[in-house]
Image (cartoon, coloured by chain):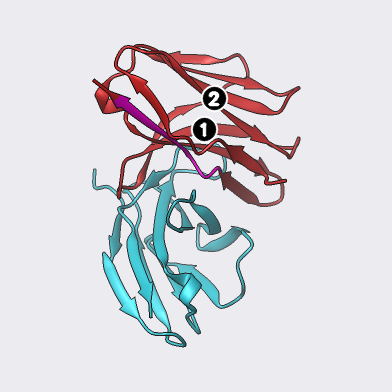
Chain colours: A cyan, B red
Amino acid sequence: ETGVTQSPTHLIKTRGQQVTLRCSSQSGHNTVSWYQQALGQGPQFIFQYYREEENGRGNFPPRFSGLQFPNYSSELNVNALELDDSALYLCASSSGQAQETQYFGPGTRLLVL
Amino acid sequence: RKEVEQDPGPFNVPEGATVAFNCTYSNSASQSFFWYRQDCRKEPKLLMSVYSSGNEDGRFTAQLNRASQYISLLIRDSKLSDSATYLCVVTIVGGSYIPTFGRGTSLIVHP
């Protein structure tokens, strides 16, 4: 059984640019959630995809968007990057929705200059 | 008031000590509760779910107090390897799914 993987591991962008982060869910999991974790803070929920549909969204602006593919892998897209977008972006997969255990990937560290 | 609040610590305890963390939540509609552990520069990993009746896993005990809207984590006989940040997660389930993490409590266990 393969775990959750994310790519890239690290990324440096400049303000105004766009970025796409990728996540492969654990085998057998149909749900992917994305989180942003700033230094010294807990992960903040961005959104969740369940069977290719957005199933919940946190307090993030529309320039944060995503999608889930038929194989349940997922992408997080961020447009018009701002300095405050610098953070660790975590993807978590689970086999259902709310009450199932989430398994996190190692994250992508994004630095916006 | 933040939706989920934790004392960031750090809690600095000697090996063998018993330490307890609380996590308060503001939304009474919250339905699912978890404790995660996060090591420095690593991803969070599930430590345990929190059930209404309370639950225990080895040295770890989790409890839920719905009336006062908090969950707790008790660690007995602390080990050096318990040093980490402990994150509580509270989930509201309605038409959609919204999990909220606390900022975490840092635990340092020293010899």
Residue indicated by mark 1: B34
- Residue A55 in the image: state x and y as whole percent: 60, 57
For this view, does B79 lie left or right of residue B57? left
Q: Please tell me in which quadrant of the rendered image residue B14 appears.
A: top left
- Residue A38 in the image: state x and y as whole percent: 45, 58
For this view, does B57 lie left or right of residue A63? left
Which disc is residue B53 wearing? none
Please tell me which residue lies in front, B34 or B26.
B26
The stretch in magenta equals: B102-109
Callout 1: SS: strand
Instruction: State how far apart marks 1 and 2 are (Cα).
Output: 5 Å
Q: Amino acid at mark 1?
A: Phe
Residue indicated by mark 2: B50
Callout 2: SS: loop
Q: Please tell me in which quadrant of the rendered image residue A77 appears.
A: bottom left
Is B105 inside the magenta-drawn segment? yes
Q: Is residue B36 above or below residue B14?
A: below
* Placement of the C terminus of chain B among the 4 image quadrants: top left
Q: Chain of mark 2?
A: B
Q: Main secondary structure of the magenta part?
A: strand
Is A46 inside the magenta-drawn segment? no
- Residue A8 visible in the picture: no
Q: Residue at x 49, y 82 (%)?
A: A79
Q: Is residue B99 above or below residue B34?
A: below
- Residue A11 visible in the picture: yes
Q: Is residue A26 above or below residue B45?
A: below
Q: Residue at x 51, y 15 (%)?
A: B55
Q: Residue at x 28, y 24 (%)?
A: B110
